[in-house]
Image (cartoon, coloured by chain):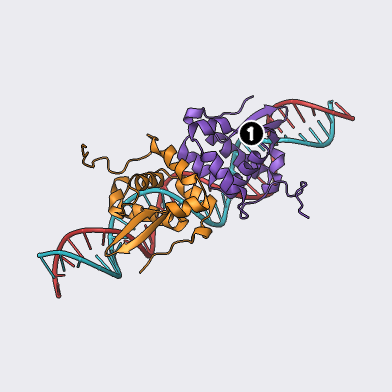
Chain colours: A orange, B purple, C red, D cyan
DNA sequence: CCAATTGTTCAATAACTGTTGAACTAAGGA
DNA sequence: TCCTTAGTTCAACAGTTATTGAACAATTGG
């Protein structure tokens, strides 16, 4: 009942870069990074596309080794494989997330989230 | 007779990542980084593919803002746009080059150079 | 059990990508 | 001038990618 993930040492640089070379997936990664530690289910990303389309993009990210998906009931809890990526490609994820962080051209997840004042 | 290049602020993160998500182009960038400062003409990369194919990949890199191509006679002198990329996406190029630096899966430029280990 | 929720799989499709060979342009040197 | 060198452009092609709706599977709650 677990989903296939590459081992850390199987993660390929060109594949990771290719997978990140898509605005939808970059937006997913940016959102995951902003909620690090919090496992999110797929529906969290529905702002970015249809259910089917998200399933496709999340599978790409998982197969590339960028994300991990854990099956919990009917949910797949998605997390960034930060530790693994940092070990394999030091600094890469940080610089990508920083660059994506203020890119207004990327689509946004949770634009209608409730703004919680401090 | 100058070739079109994007301005620094026009360089797009997903486009750069997408362009780097190809082994041939990563090999080109890795080689350019290893010869930084030295302008190289296109023929330098013929190990990686046919003349036509190289023209295609080098155009992709140039249009994405990763490389600069200067016309000098019948040659195009290719350089990495390191300063521009560092300004736009701090740390990104360094981490990509470092990650590519020891990737045995990438094709190699200049395998006939003085490269032979004892 | 039944129904709702969560997400995947499938087939179809349109668009894009990488690769090729032939033909082309442009500059430089004999 | 003619030939060579350096590189581009073009049309064609096979393969891949992103997207969609319909159908499917699995789990959970009533």
* Count of all numbered marks drawn on residues in the image: 1
Percent position (x, y) of residue A49? 32, 48
Name the quarter where the N terminus of chain B is drawn: top right
Tag 1 subunit: B
Neighbourhood count class around disc 1 (C-alpha, 10 Å): few under 14, some 14–19, many 20 upward? many
Quadrant for residue B2, please give it: top right
Q: Is residue B99 visible?
A: yes
Percent position (x, y) of residue D20? 32, 51
**Observer-nearest residue: B31 or A24?**
B31
**Observer-nearest residue: C14 or D29?**
D29
Residue under label 1, please give it. B79
**Observer-nearest residue: B97 or B68?**
B97
Percent position (x, y) of residue B45? 69, 43
Q: Residue visible at 49% across and 32% down?
A: B88
Name the quarter where the C terminus of chain B is drawn: bottom right
Q: Residue visible at 59% across and 44% down?
A: B25
Label 1: state its secondary structure.
Answer: strand
**Observer-nearest residue: A100 or A49?**
A100
Q: Residue visible at 57% across and 38% down?
A: B61
Is the residue B37 above or below the residue A72 in the image?
above
Is the residue C10 above or below the residue B83 in the image?
below
Quadrant for residue B82, please give it: top right
């Amino acid at each position: 009942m677990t989903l296939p993930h590459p081992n850390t040492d199987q993660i390929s640089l060109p594949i990771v870069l290719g997978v990140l070379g898509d605005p939808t997936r970059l937006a997913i990664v940016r959102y995951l990074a902003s909620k690090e530690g919090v496992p999110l289910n797929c529906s969290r990303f529905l702002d970015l596309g249809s259910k089917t389309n998200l399933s496709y993009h999340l599978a790409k990210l998982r197969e590339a080794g960028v994300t991990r998906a854990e099956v919990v009931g009917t949910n797949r809890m998605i997390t960034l494989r930060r530790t693994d990526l940092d070990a394999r490609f030091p600094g890469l994820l940080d610089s990508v997330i920083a660059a994506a962080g203020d890119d207004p051209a990327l689509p946004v997840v949770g634009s209608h989230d409730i703004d919680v004042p401090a």
